[in-house]
Each structure stands twice: as C-alpha cells, then as structure tokens.
Image: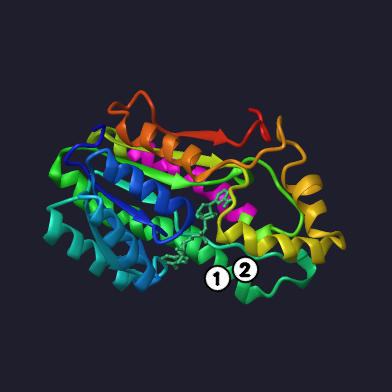
Amino acid sequence: MRLKDKIAIVTGAASGIGKEIAMRFAHEGAKVVIADIDEEKAKATANEILKNKHEAMAVSVDVTNEEQVELAMEKVVSAYGGVNTLVSNAGTEFISPLEELPFSEWKKLLAIHLDGAFLMTRACLKGMYPRGKGGSIIYMGSVHSKQASVLKAPYVTAKHGLIGLCKVVAKEGAKHNVRANVICPGFVRTPLVEKQIPEIAKGLGISEEEVIKKVILKDTVDGEFTTTMDVADVALFFASFDSNALTGQSLVVSHGWFMQ
Ligand code: NAD
C-alpha cells in the first residue's frame, strides 16, 4: 500500500495509460479521481475501481477549460479534502506534415497538452501549498519530449514544453515540498496509437505492418511495445518517492528507443 490514504487526480484516466495508472494507484491505497472529458467512460472506470473495493470518483472535465478545471477541483476538495498527486496525462495526437497542418489543429493539440497541464497544475498547487502536506505533480511526456519524428510537429512541441513546465514547478514547489517529474514513454498500444498507425502509413506511403516494424519499434532494443503497466510502474515510483531529492526529472521508459 504505497499510496495509502493519498488522494490522486489522473487526467485522461478513462482510457489507456491514464486508466492503468488510476487502477494501480487505487490498488496501492490511493483515493483516485478519474478526470476525463469522456464522462461515461470516466464513470465506468471509477465503477471498475469501486467494484474492486478501492476508492474512486469520476469527474467530467475538459482540461482546456479554466472554469471546468476549477469546478472539478472544488468537487475533489469537497469529496476528499485535498490532493496529494496530480498525473497530468490527458492527451491526443494529430498526424500531418507541417506544411499542411491546419492552425486550428495546432492550437487544439497544444491546448490539451499544455493549457491542460498548466490549468490542472495551478488548480492543484493552490490547494497543495496552504495544506502544507507537499505533493507530487507528474506530467505524461513522451520520447517526443526528447526527440522529434516527422508528421508530429504539435505533439513534439507540446511534449518538449512539458519538460519546461515541470522544471519550473520543481523550483517553485520545492519550499512547499511539491515535486514535479515527467514520464517519457515509448509507443504504447492504446487507442491513441491504434488510431495513428493507419494515418502514419498514409502519410509515409507504407503499409501498417511496416509502420510498426520500420517506424514505431525500429529503434527499440528488442522490437517491443512499452506497456501501460510499465508506465504505471514509473508513475507509482514518482508518486511514492517522498522527498525533493527526485524532482525536475524526466524518465524515459521506451525499450531503449531513446537513451539519454
Ligand atoms: P488514450 O487515447 O487511450 O487516452 C487519452 C484520454 O485523454 C482519453 O480518455 C480522452 O478522453 C482524454 N482526453 C482527451 N482530451 C481531453 C481533454 N481535453 N480533457 C480531459 N480529458 C481528455 O491515449 P493514451 O495513449 O493513454 O495517452 C495518454 C497520454 O500518454 C497522452 O498524454 C499521450 O500523449 C501520452 N503518451 C502516449 C503514448 C502512447 O504510445 N500511447 C506514448 C507516450 C506518451
């Protein structure tokens, strides 16, 4: 029970990586808030956790919407009394060569990844600082926080940006014992990745099988996808590491695709 009685908000927790992290945190004793724009799936995830006799609540929130974020935080504070851990994980992908990329899609993606991370962080810090119990802010970066790929300009830009935000939170949060770190996964087979395989195939003029072998897993040490469980392990490590010794860092979990 490494998170006994801790309160954790996970954004984008109705699916994929966020859902796995929420289930793992609950299993480790945390009260988990499933914060997602998809209300039905968020409720279903919270019910799954409750069925396992762990603690969870669903909160419907678009992380790009300031009012909705503030309201969601009020609901969490009134239900659980505060927040110990934020996993800012909600995200999307948009595949396009830069010269054809609509400005609207650029702005939409940056808003979800960066505005969302900022708004959720600010809302959490406003509660964490006066509460005086410290906290852990975890951002879902990517190998694309460290390096680029073709057809992913807004995603690569946003994921690099999260590292900057994390470092500022680490510096400002230190005197309140609030830590901030980034997880940088390689490719994980979630709906986000299943959707982009045919899009990359189209963009590069190759088959979907070639996308997996020659693009997605080409530079891993063993040709394997990273799993949601691998990422949840790292999230648990960051959430349960209780000192400022580990802050302002980014950890790559990618089967060696990217090596520091
Ligand atoms: P996913 O599509 O399975 O889940 C994303 C979740 O985010 C969904 O439940 C969706 O409803 C939610 N969401 C989207 N926009 C939102 C908004 N505005 N407000 C609130 N919730 C919103 O995707 P995933 O693969 O689990 O991705 C989760 C995170 O992990 C993303 O930040 C993604 O960039 C990152 N990531 C994924 C991979 C991968 O290979 N899958 C690799 C590295 C990083």
Per the image, label 2 sits on a secondary structure element best described as helix
Cβ at disc 1 under 8 Å from ligand 1 = no
- Mark 1 lies on residue: 108
Residue 159, magenta (yes or no): yes
Residue 2 in view, yes or no: yes
Residue shown at 74% from the left, 64% from the top: 198
Kindly give the residue lying farthest to the front in the view shown.
Answer: 51
Q: CA distance from mark 2 to mark 1?
A: 6 Å
Residue 68 located left or right of residue 53: right
Q: Residue at x 24, y 56 (%)?
A: 51
Q: Which residue is depicted at the point 27% across and 62% down?
A: 47
Q: Position of residue 30 (x, y in %)?
A: 23, 44
Residue 111 lies in the magenta-colored region: no
Q: In the structure shown, which secondary structural element does the residue marked by tag 1 occupy?
A: helix
The local crowd at label 2, few if under 14, some if 14 to 19, many if 20 or more residues have their Cα within 10 Å, is some
Tell me what residue is drawn at x 79 percent, y 54 percent: 209
Location of residue 251 in the rendering, given as x and y in whole percent from the top left corner: 52, 33
Q: Which residues are magenta?
A: 156-172
Q: Is residue 34 above or below residue 28?
A: below
Three-letter code, disc 2: Trp
Q: Is residue 135 left or right of residue 233?
A: left
Residue 106: numbered disc: 2
Contact, mark 2 vs mark 1 (Cβ under 8 Å): yes
